[in-house]
Structures are given as structure tokens and as C-alpha cells.
Amino acid sequence: MDQRKCECGHTNPVGTLLCESCGKPLNVEIHEQTSFPDMRYEGMARRSQTNKTKVIDRIWNFFSSVKIAIGIIIVILVASAVGTIFPQQMYIPVPVPTEADVARFYTETYGTLGTIFYGLGFHNMYSSWWFVTLLVMLGTSLVICSLDRVVPLYKALKKPRLNQHKSFLKGQKLFAEGELAPEDNQEAILDASALALKEKGYRIFRTERAIMAEKGRFSRWGPYINHIGLILFLVGTLMRSLPGFYLDEYVWVREGQTMAIPNTPYYIKNENYTTEYWSEEEMPEQLELKGGAIVKSYKTEAILYENKSADVPGKKPDLVEVQKGPIVVNHPMEQDSLYIYQSGVQEMQLGALNFTVVDLKNNKKEIGLIKIDLYNPQPEQTIADGFTVRILDYFPDFIMGKDGKPATKTNLPKNPMVALELIGENGNYNEKLVYLEGTILTQKNDPRYGLEIKMPDLIDIAGLNVRVDKALPLIYFGSFIFLAGVAIGMFWQHRRVWVQTQEGSIMVAAHTNKNWFGLRREVDGLVKQAELPVTIEDKTKAKA
Amino acid sequence: MQLIQLSDWLLDVAFLLYVISSIVFAVAVTGKNWAGRDPKQHEERYGRIAYWLAVIGFVAQTGYVMARWIAGGHSPTSNMFEFMAFLDYCIILAYLIIYRIYKLTSIGAFVLPLGVIMLAYSYVFPKEITPLIPSLQSYWLHIHVTTAALGEGILAVGFAAGLMYLIRTVPQHISTKSTKWLEIVLAVVLMLVGFILMDSSFARMDQKTVFEMKKEEMNAAGQMVKPKVEYILPAIVAPADSTIIKEGPISPLFEAPTWMEGKDAARKLNTMLWSVLTGGILYGGLRLIFRKRLGAAIKPSVESVDPELLDEISYRAISIGYPVFTLGALIFAMIWAEEAWGRFWGWDPKEVWALIVWLFYSAYLHLRLSRGWIGAKSAWMSVIGFVIILITLVVVNLVIAGLHSYAGV
Amino acid sequence: MNKSNRTYVRIAVLGVLLVALVFALYSSFVKDPGAVKVGSDAPNFSLEQLNGPELTLESLKGKGVILNFWGTWCEPCKKEMPALQQQYTKFKDKGLVVVGVNIGESPVAVEPFVKQFGIDFPILLDRQSQITKLYRIGPIPTTFFIDPDGEVQEIFIGQLDEAMIESKITKILP
């Protein structure tokens, strides 16, 4: 059986709760007022209730259930909370280069619980397959719940019923009935009621014996609007995985260095980096800082270049300056959809070693200066007339190898060792020296020339984070729509008041989805102003 | 500086007024049946006095906010003291708005004490105005934190009304699951009170316990030092891997588990233990005085209130607070995070907990609007929701270290 | 709307959502779609040589290429250098090129090393580690075996010996 016939003669689709024509509850024996069918879609058939046989319909029905939606929300909630018990892998405060290090970190730091946390994959929970699936399920539920309800709601709101069945009115939370005196003019009473309601901002629908007054109908769309906003938001987050929509790079740039930003045609130069501290005069209050200081700003003076021949990575670039300016926290450099953030710093790193060559046999007379750029040492430099210095060997991060030969631990100049050859007198004299850990080792016992160690150049290395996120506008737009929808749904209420006369009696009923007290006040006002011969009974649904 | 003193003074004034207002509210709702009084008139009269005291207190706190804002050059929302005081300000503001709508006296008898507790809690934290570190130097500090606090303040009123509903409706003549849980909620509130009492009274005495960690850490100036941990409360639990360098009134009974993050974790655990202890003693004492469940003791003072009205107020507050919270704690937060860190969402613990609060209240709204959860179920949820907010504000900062952990908290 | 229409609408909606699920899962699994895999084309690049002009990978098409990422600080790199040199000498007339990409070091540091091992295959200097990032190099040495069409036939992480190299070379010789 596909259809349900009401006693008024109208045929309704399966799943209809209240007759589309007269509003009488179908298929429900009304013994008690509290079991009156739900008013949310004015008793219209919701789509998921109509067909329950095919697989497609089963899936559809599953996701169209609010119970399931709430279930998904709760599961996500609990999972999210569990994920914060220990830090996620990305927030581990020490370097963990390999998976084994990650596992060791959780076990050593948090004991057995940490091992379990890692074992269950909670250290990367928010990008795990099951968490992502949960989020998509929430999105699915959002889409299907909305589609499933918006159609009947549209139908219901488009054709509001006027002459309601008496049992419909009786079923409302606010209902009153009174006897009409024979001399009462029904017309006049309804007119007065209509006027009173109109003054309160209601829209009036009128037939001969009935009024339906309504306001705030648009607030019923609020939930659908906010769900659309959420769907847009989720689509936005998905879009970030499309090629070209999202980029996340990190570059360390030394002062003076021009660095390629991977996967973009841009190069960035760090001209100067500074960390500023708040001075005492700037502080509103004397603070006990115990030797510390409070940072005022992290700032990289940068130049952004575009590489005009960016077709092959690594190829000698053809750079054109596109922007110049400071990058500070909270104020990224912006170039089209590319943002460059001040994100980290390594301060006071060794940049270059400085020495003075002195003539030991001549009262330490200064011959010239040697500068050894530790990142780009010159193989040979002339420091004075007829005097050159050649680098024989360079180990940026010195370590004595197992074979007894000097070697380097990394490619960073953390502990540089340099072997130099001093060539004087136009090549007629030479001697070899080694610089290591602040001392000079000489080859000859009685060398002619010596090195005096000067203050090395210390440089700062700025950590810059480079991002592109083209889905951001959609994500913000979705958030905005969500908020607008919530506001529409929450700050306004859909109120309806029915006044009907029938067989010598008058009935008043009212319905709203929230703020019953406001509605009650308005109906009280109506009864008073139109002098309706009724007293409002207020059935309490709130008692659990 | 003058302005700072003024702002401190104004906050003290506000605090005092809230305390007096709470007392007058209590008189208003409990003294109705004193001999020779017309209950309605009594409640109205004292309720009005209490309301105006709250209004004056609110004005004083507004003065505090403005003075501190001007003195510090930034909105007073940059550390835990400022934030908790501002949250309290928002709770009172939300109360005043809800009162204007519903004119229900007894709601003040619940919200004002909550306000007092929150403000007292803020006094526990260091009060200095510190200049802003770079990541906080943004106008989003004003927008994001204030809006989030406002949302939480409104939700707190929803909690107060929900709690009132439960006290009003849970039958007290027999012991049920509901009465037990209600007692637990009240006991938790008393723990917070206990903590504040302990902390503020011990802070006045010269009895600090100081520990020194064995492991060196880098300080702000880049030197390696052994960090020191100062306990205001007597030490029950010592930090793991530390030595006492200044003895307190008692010697610690055990060491904190090592998985607790950071050197301050043990101090926080110690504080938590004290709170549970004093809260338990307070609760036990009150039970002895009243010789019945606390819920049963408070019940008569809300007996005259229509439970449906309480249900409505709680729901109304949540339905207003929810979008404000969403805007402040999620949307503005995302925009700022994008600007400061280059990602709008990073699953940082604080972000996750804001999401959890949001998901919880989303579930609340769906259950209420769609599954007909009104009355008691809805009231329980409003209570749980506020507990989650408190977890977000307090526990996440205490136990879980993340980008949001303010200095000194 | 009649019932069969409704079914189609539902199938369409669920289909779209299924695609979204697959896409979401795919992108959370494949964190790095740009990673170089066996079977994919070796990304082209161009770098300066230690002692010579810029070298572009594409110009080596038609030859089998062993692309070896190394650094002077890396012990296994040192150990496998002679093996690479041997194999290069043995197969260079049969269309094999060995290309060593040094990671982020200066010529002053690389030069003595190259001399010490008597290397005569091209050594490229990736001063900014740009190509190292492009090829997603983690631990070194990492060696790519690229066939004459520019397709990666094998990726090997760790130290190679002569026998291993020889067995892999067969796959990429023209």
C-alpha cells in the first residue's frame, strides 16, 4: 500500500504523519495529547521513511537518521579527546627522524600507555584512515539529512494549512477552547484577532472561519543554511588535496643567502634577521624576569625574487625582484596566493672565521686579514702584495674518523677545521697551519708567520614557512554561511497561531520550536486584546 | 603606574560587590519563609538589591577592563589571570542580559556565586601585565579571545540554569543515580572553592617549598640552568627527578609520574590533590551541617521557580552562546592561526578541545531539537557541556602542553 | 518525484559522497603525490658540476644513469665510491653514466674528497639541497637507477657494492 487515505478524503503519501489536507493525525490513536505527532515538518512524509527495501535506500536511511548523525558526532568527539592525551607526532618536542625514534619517544616518555598510544596509531590520529572516514561520514550525514528534510519542509511551508482538524489544534502545546455566545459575531472576533496578531508582526492567512497567523518562517531554513555552510567547509578542506591548491614548504635562509623556495618559481633572500626584546621602559610594569627577557619581535628583512627561467629545477636562475620588506610573526609576506611566514630562527651561528696574518719575526707586524666563509670558502685569497692563502682541507663539522683521518659529521659548520697554506714572498715561502676548536696548530716549530684569531662572523638563520592554500576562501565562506544559518535558526523563531471557530465554539492554538514563553506572552496578549472567551491551558512537555 | 593600581582596585571592588550580591541573592531566595514576610515581596525586594549590586560590580569591572587595556596597551586577555577575569566579566554580562529577558531572581543566586568563584580563581594566577610576545601581537588577540570568552560566559549561564533545573526537579526523598551525580557536580564546584581558599591563604604565608630539577634546561636568555619549581601549597607530590632546596611545612609523600609534561606538571598535580582534598572536606562539612544531601538542602530555595522556565533559559542561553562560541573560539581562531602560523587548523590540543566543546553543544542541539531531549536530559547536557569547557580552560592548560599554554599556567 | 527517479537521485548523491570518501582517504594516505617512485619519470633538473658546465639530466637520455646522492660526512657514501667508480669505468663505453649529487657542500670540501677517490664521473653540487628535496632524499646514500627513457627502475637506500651495482646496471643499460 502506497498511500494513506484520511477520513476527510485526501490521499497522502506513505510516511505522512498529519493529513496534508486537514491536519488530522494519521495512523495515530490520540489518547493523550503528549503523543501527538512531531510538528517539525508539519507531518509531511520525510523522504527516508518512504522506501525501505533497496540497498541504496538502506544506506540512505542510515545516513538520514539524526540518531546516527549524533552518534557520529559523539564518536568524533571522543576520538578527538583521546588524541590529545599525548602529543601528536608533529608536536613531539625533540627530533624523531625515523619511525623507530617515534616509537621509542612514546615508550620512553609515557611508559606503557605511550606504547599503546603509538601502537594504536593515535600519534597520527587526525590523519588516520578511520578518523578521515568518520569525518566523511559526518559530511555524508550532513548532506543526506539535509536533503531528506528540506524537501518536505519546503512543501509544508509553501502551502500552510488553514482549516486544521480539531485534533490537530488540540494536539498543540498551547491550546484553548471556549464557547461562543449566540450573539457573538464570528466574523468580528476573527477580525479582531487578525488585527491583534498583525500588530504583533504576524502574517495573516484567513478563511471564513479560520485564521492562521505566522511569523519568522525563514528561521526554519536556518539549520539547512548552516549545514550547507558546513558542507562547503568540508569540501574546502578536501580541495586542499587537489594538485596546486596547497603547498607547505619550509626553508632555512642564512643572512645574505638567496634560497630557492621548492615547488614555486620564487627565491627568497634573507638580508638581515633580528630578534628584538622589550626594553624595561616599554613595559607597563616592572617584572621579575630572573635574567630572562621577553621577545618583542622576530623579523627577517627579505627580498622575494621570481625566477624567470623556472622550467628546470636547479638551473641557474634568472631572478627578478618582486617584493622587498620585513617578515614578522603575524604579518606574513604575501605574493599572489603565496604566503611566507616568520617561523623559526637559529641565532648566532658561525658564519665565517676571521684571522689576521702576522709576521712573527717582525714584531707581529700585521700582514693582512683572512676571512673564511664557512658556507662558501674561497679556495685561495690574496691578502697582501705577494701573499696568498690557500685552503688545503675543510671539514665543517670536524670529527676524527675511525681510520685516523679527519672527517666531518655533517655538512653544517658547527665545529670547523681548516687546513691553510700561507704562501708569502711571491711564492717563495710557504708554511701550513691548521685551525681547530679555537687553536692554531703549526707545521713548523719556528714558523715565520702566525695567525691571530679574530672574532668570527656570527649569523642568524631564519626559518621561513611558505604556504599556499587556495581553498581558504571557500573554507571561510563556508564558516560564514554556517554562522549565518545558526543565527537565523537560533535568534529568530517560527511562530504560528491558529484561531478557528466551529460549531459554536472558538479554538486558539499556537506552535513554535523555541521560546515558548515569548509565544505564550503573545497569545495572552491576543486573548486579552481580541477579548476571546478562552483560557489558555499550558500542557507541559518539559517534564521528563 | 597609577592606571594599573586603579584597575587592580576596580577589580577588587567588583569582586567585593559580587560577593555581597551573592549573599543578598542567597537571602532573597532562602529567606522567603522567614517569619512575618510575604515571600514574593521579600524575594523581589532583595532580588532587586542584589541585581543592582551586580550591575555596579559589572560597571566597576568594566572600569578594570578599560584601565588595564589602556595601561597594558592590549586587551586584558593575554595571560591566564586576565583571561579568567575576562571570562568572569562575560559571565556577569551574559547574566545581566538573560535577567533583562526573563526577570528571574533566583538565577542570580546561582550565576553570581559562579562569577565569584571564577574571579577568585583568576586571582590565583600571576597578575603582572606582561608585554606581548610576537605571536600574540595581533588585533585578533582582542577579537578571538574576547568573543570566545563571551561565548563561554553565555554557555556558563546555560549551565547555571541547567543546574538549577536539576536541583529543582530531581526528587530528593530517595537516593537515585540523579541525586548522586548532582552531589558529584556540587562537590566539584566545592573543590574549585577549596582550591581558591587554599591557594589564597597559603600565598599570604612565607612557607614556599622550592625544588630544583636535576636536568638542565635552556632559559630565555639561552643559558643552561637547573630550573626551579616553587610550590605555594605544601608539597604532597614532588616533581620527578628533583631535589628540595627550600623545605616547606611538610615533606612530599611521593614523586610525580614522569609522563606528566614539563617541570610545572608536578606543581599542578599537587594543586589538584589539594583541591580534591579541601573540596571533599568542605563537602563533608556541609553534609554534616545540613544532615542531608546538598541538593536537598538547596532545593527549597528554587522550589517556587517554574522548571519549564529554567529549561527555557538554559536552552536560550545555549542557543545564543553556541554561535558566539563558534565565531570566537573556532572561526576567528582559524583566521588568526592562518595569519600567525600559516595553517588555520593544526590539531593542537587547545584547538581540538574547542572543537570538542563545539561538537558537544552541536549534539546537544540535535538531541534537543530533533530527538526531543528537553527537561532533565537537556539540563544534564548543559552541565556536562560546561564541565568540558572547564576542562578546556583548566586541564588542557595544566596537563597538556601545546601552543596555547600561557606562561605561568 | 516518482520512485525510480528518486532512486537515481539517491544513487547520484551517494556516488558523489563515495568519491569524496575515496578522495579523502587517498589524500590522507598518499601524503606526497610528488614523491619519486619506481616506474615514474625521474624529475628533470640542472646543476653545476664541480669542474665543468651545468649538467641537465634530460641531456643524458638514451643512456643508463646511476644517480647517486652523497655527502662527504657520510661513511657508507665514502665506502661505495670506489665501487661506483669501478663500474663507471667498466660500463661507460656501453652507455652508462654515473652522476654523483653532493648535498649542500662547498667545492673546497668536495674537491679533495673527489681527488682522494680518483672519481672521474660527473659530480654535481646541490648547494641549496634543492634537488635533494625534489627527490625526497632521506638517509644517504640513496641511489636511483634510471633507464635510457628517463624512467626510474630502482631506488636503493644504503651502501652498494660492485656486484649489486652490476646486477642493477643490466636493467638500465641501453
Image (cartoon, rainbow, N blue to C red):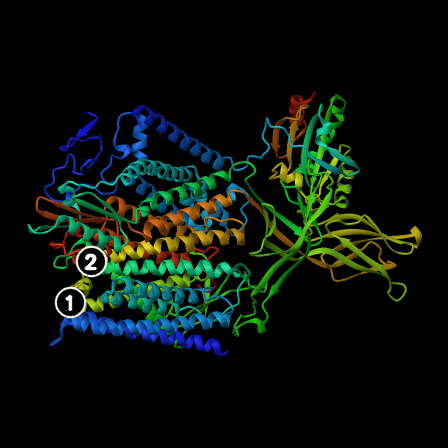
Residue A259 percent location from the top left of the image: 68, 47
Chain identity of mark 1: B
In the picture, the quarter occupied by the N terminus of chain A is: top left
Q: Residue at x 16, y 38 (%)?
A: A24
Q: What residue is shown at x 20% (from left), y 27% (from top)?
A: A3
Decide if residue B244 is on the left or right side of residue C53: left
x, y (%) of residue B142?
47, 62
Is A445 drawn above or below residue A57 in the view shown?
below
Residue drawn 85% across the image and 55% down it: A444
At label 2, the amino acid type is Gly
**Residue B17: horizontal and vertical position, in percent?**
32, 75
The amino acid type, in three-letter code, at marker 1 is: Arg
B397 and B122: which one is in front?
Answer: B122
Query: Dot 1, crowdedness within 10 Å: few (<14), some or many (≥20)?
Result: few
Which is nearer the eye, A58 or C143? A58
Q: Tell me if A52 is positioned left or right of C127 in this view.
A: left
Residue under circle 1?
B291
For disc 2, the chain is A
* Residue in the foreground of this view, choosing between B215 and A225: A225
Q: Residue furthest left?
A: A182
Q: Does the image show residue A303?
A: no
Give how far across and how far down residue C152 sits, in percent: 63, 27
Nearer the observer, disc 2 or disc 1? Answer: 2
Which residue position holds label 2?
Answer: A525
> In which image quadrant can residue A386 be found?
bottom right
Give A405 or A86, whichever is nearer the viewer: A86
Pointer 2 and pointer 1: residues touching (CB < 8 Å)? no
